[in-house]
Image (tube, coloured by chain):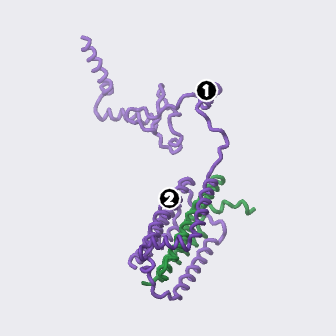
């Protein structure tokens, strides 16, 4: 079985997530695109685990999932706090440090 | 590979959809499609534990958290179409395409060879073998995870917590405030009149009528009044005459009047 298509799919998904972070303005959607990038890297890790015949890649993917869960909790709490004070979930509106 | 060739186009399309849909809820649902498809690919890649974790943790927990926050922030908090930095969208797309091309071309230059497969590594079951690795080679990383998780939990609690600035109003305080308002401004201290006192329309969008036949303004919910979905009482009283006309009855032969005279007659019979 060839593993190359899986890696290419992972690269495509990572690219889409990357463009999403740059293009979208809603902070929650930006966050979803970050999750998409993490998922894409997970797919690559699991594929490499199969290609190399050991489980280290799967362990790495597992740790990525744990870190992603913790990151989402804190990130969404920050987004909610910003929304509560500024009544906006747009990444452009949080520009107080700019001026 | 069959699962891959079915799921890969679906995943790419759903991921592209995240870029283009207006509403954040739709983006979340498309992300769910990507994540569930990814879980099935994990199964095809001989990672049954990660398949389950992907479904439970990612699709079950993280995505539901996203949906909850969307609910709190407001579902209609959609993206603004206005571009704040000029040319940013075009540049981002161009650089994204370049990144994708570089990645895909770079990967296709490499020969991976035949996959070794996980039959040896998974001997005795995928989960026991993962546990062997996790609690021996990666035990320090695993222990560090606990610190990360507790930091995340405390961080979320601290960030989402809101301090109460005024003391909570007690029941006795509310009663005293209502009576004080009655004394000062004449505001009625009791509950608002209930909506919907017609015989055929007892829903909340029908206002209550005062004894003189006018509408009790307080009985209508402010939300319904703002939406403009409140029925008007005179319009409803009009169709009663219409129904009577359809039945071919003269107004004095209407059921309530006839029933009343019947009842009067029966009581007279009872008296005799």
Q: Residue at x 66, y 60 (%)?
A: A93
Which mark lies nearer to you, 2 or 1? 2
Q: Residues within 10 Å of mark 1 (few under 14, many from 20)?
A: some
Mark 2 — residue?
A: B64
Task: Decide which of B111, B17 is in the foreground and name it.
Answer: B111
Query: Judging from the image, what secondary structure is the residue with disc 1 in?
Result: helix
Give chain B's shade. purple
Task: Decide which of B50, A13 is in the foreground and name it.
Answer: B50
Mark 2 or mark 1, earlier in chain: 2
Mark 1 — residue?
A: B179
Query: Judging from the image, what secondary structure is the residue with disc 2 in?
Result: helix
Q: Which chain comes out green in the rendered image?
A: A
Task: Decide which of B100, A9 is in the foreground and name it.
Answer: A9
In the rendered structure, the residue with mark 1 lies on which chain? B
Can see residue A26? no
Residue B160: x and y in percent read 61, 53
Does B3 sit above or below residue B258? below
Residue B179: x and y in percent read 61, 26
Residue lying farthest to the front in this orientation: B136
Residue lying farthest to the top in this orientation: B272
């Amino acid at each position: 079985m060839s593993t190359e298509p899986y890696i290419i799919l992972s690269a495509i998904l990572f690219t889409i997530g990357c463009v999403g972070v740059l293009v979208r303005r809603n902070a929650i959607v930006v966050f979803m695109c970050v999750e998409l990038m993490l998922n894409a890297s997970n797919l690559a890790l699991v594929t490499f685990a199969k290609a190399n015949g050991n489980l280290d890649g799967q362990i790495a993917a597992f740790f990525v999932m744990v870190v992603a869960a913790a990151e989402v909790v804190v990130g969404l709490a920050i987004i909610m706090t910003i929304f509560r004070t500024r009544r906006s979930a747009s990444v452009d509106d949080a520009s107080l440090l700019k001026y | 590979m069959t699962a891959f060739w079915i799921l890969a186009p679906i995943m790419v399309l759903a991921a592209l959809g995240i870029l283009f849909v207006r509403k954040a809820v739709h983006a979340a649902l498309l992300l769910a499609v990507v994540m569930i498809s990814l879980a099935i690919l994990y199964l095809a890649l001989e990672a049954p534990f990660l398949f389950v974790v992907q479904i439970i943790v990612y699709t079950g927990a993280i995505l539901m958290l996203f949906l909850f926050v969307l609910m709190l922030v407001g579902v209609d908090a959609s993206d603004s179409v206005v571009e704040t930095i000029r040319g940013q969208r075009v540049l981002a797309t161009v650089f994204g395409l370049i990144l994708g091309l570089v990645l895909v071309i770079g990967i296709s230059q490499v020969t991976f060879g035949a996959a070794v497969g996980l039959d040896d590594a998974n001997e005795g079951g995928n989960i026991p073998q993962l546990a062997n690795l996790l609690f021996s080679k990666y035990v320090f990383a695993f222990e560090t995870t606990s610190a990360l998780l507790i930091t995340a939990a405390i961080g979320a609690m601290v960030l989402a917590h809101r301090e109460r600035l005024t003391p909570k109003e007690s029941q006795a305080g509310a009663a005293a405030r209502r009576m004080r308002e009655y004394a000062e401004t004449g505001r009625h201290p009791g509950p608002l009149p209930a909506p919907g006192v017609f015989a055929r329309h007892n829903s909340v969008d029908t206002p209550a009528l005062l004894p003189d036949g006018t509408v009790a303004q307080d009985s209508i919910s402010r939300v319904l009044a703002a939406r403009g979905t409140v029925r008007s009482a005179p319009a409803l009283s009009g169709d009663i005459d219409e129904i009577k006309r359809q039945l071919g009855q003269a107004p004095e032969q209407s059921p309530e009047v006839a029933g009343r005279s019947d009842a009067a007659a029966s009581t007279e019979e009872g008296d005799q």
